[in-house]
Every structure is written in C-alpha cells, then in structure tokens.
Image (spheres, rainbow, N blue to C red):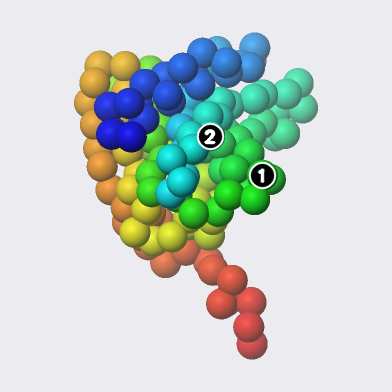
Amino acid sequence: MNIEALIQEAKAAREMAYVPYSKFKVGAALLGKDGKVYRGCNIENAAYSMTNCAERTALFKAYSEGNTQFDAIAVVADTKRPVPPCGACRQVISELCAPETKVILTNLHGDIQELTVAELLPGAFSPEDLDA
Ligand SMILES: O=c1ccn([C@H]2C[C@H](O)[C@@H](CO)O2)c(=O)[nH]1
Ligand SMILES: [Zn+2]
C-alpha cells in the first residue's frame, strides 16, 4: 500500500472519532508488514483524562490481535501544519514500533511531513532503562 492510500485510510478512521468534548477529530492508519491496516480514531470520555488518541487506538488494536510488525503509521487532523502527535503517543509509538518505521503526519490541506519513529521522540524512555 502506498502513502496516499494509507492517508486515505487515516481520513476514513478520523470520521469515526468520538469527540463530544473537543470536537477535534483525529484519524490514524497503521500498516502492518503483512499488508493489514489498523484504523484508529480518538475516543474521548466525560472523565477527560481517559481519552485515547487515534495513534494509540490503532496500535492497541494491532497488538491486541497479535500484530506487532509495521511499515508505517499515518495520522491526520484538521490542523494548520501536519498534525503533531502528543507526547504520550510519541512515547507509546517509540516502544511499540521499530525505530525505522515511517511516520506520516498530515492535515486536510494535504501538507505532509514524513519522519521515522526514531526521529519522533529522541531520548525516549525505553524498556532497557528499567534494567539497573
Ligand atoms: O496526535 C493527536 C493529538 C490529539 N489527539 C486527540 C486527543 C483529544 O481527543 C483531541 C484534542 O486534544 O485530539 C489525538 O488523537 N492525536
Ligand atoms: Zn496522543
């Protein structure tokens, strides 16, 4: 699947966002090495801090089905610049995706920023840091 098609998947995921509080819809599409695509949207809650971002929804869907090998993740929102993932998602993406995985950030204007997982969060806290 090419990048444009993955962005289309992220846009379709965005339409499912449950955002009664912020009204800010985000979509993500995670491409497995086997070609499977996992869509994710943000899901909010009246207890605001329970909100799950689109990126983490997609990743948790894939992991919960045993799929842990990915080529790329695309994220889209209605932002002026390509949507920047929040810090929590950068941390989770850093652990659950290989460093060379492509990250495609975009918006509804068609601006695209492409980087790698390694570039998304330099100095991420990692499982190795748990070893004394
Ligand atoms: O990359 C991002 C940034 C924000 N959000 C969500 C969280 C919340 O529902 C809304 C506003 O922050 O957007 C995401 O899903 N992904
Ligand atoms: Zn996030």
User: Where does the image place residue 9, in percent across and percent down from the top left?
Assistant: 42, 24
User: Where does the image place residue 21, in percent across and percent down from the top left?
Assistant: 64, 15
In the image, the residue with mark 1 has its CB under 8 Å from the nearest atom of ligand 1: no
Residue 104 falls in which quadrant of the image?
Answer: top left
Residue, x 32% and y 53% (percent of image)? 116
For residue 25, the mark is none
In which quadrant will I find the C terminus? bottom right
In the image, the residue with mark 2 has its CB under 8 Å from the nearest atom of ligand 1: no
Tell me how far mark 1 sits from mark 2, CA to CA.
10 Å
Q: Secondary structure at mark 2?
A: strand
Q: Secondary structure at mark 1?
A: loop
User: Where does the image place residue 34, in percent across and percent down from the top left?
Assistant: 46, 46
Residue 78 falls in which quadrant of the image?
Answer: top left
Q: Residues within 10 Å of mark 1 (few under 14, many from 20)?
A: few
Instruction: Name the residue at the bottom extreme.
Output: 132
* Horizontal arrangement in the rendering, residue 43 relative to residue 5 (left or right): right
Which of these two is toward me, 65 or 34?
Answer: 34
Q: Is residue 82 visible?
A: no
Q: Is residue 54 above or below residue 35?
A: above
User: Where does the image place residue 76, in percent across and percent down from the top left?
Assistant: 39, 26
Residue, x 43% and y 60% (percent of image)? 98
Type of the residue with mark 2: Tyr
Residue, x 56% and y 77% (percent of image)? 128
Q: Is residue 70 visible?
A: yes
Q: In the rendered structure, which disc, 1 or 2, sits on the residue that comes first in sequence?
A: 2
Q: Is residue 76 above or below residue 66?
A: above
Q: Label 1: which residue?
A: 65
Q: Label 2: which residue?
A: 38
Instruction: Name the residue at the right extreme.
Output: 47
Assess whether mark 2 and mark 1 are in contact (beta carbons under 8 angstroms): yes
Q: Residues within 10 Å of mark 2 (few under 14, many from 20)?
A: many
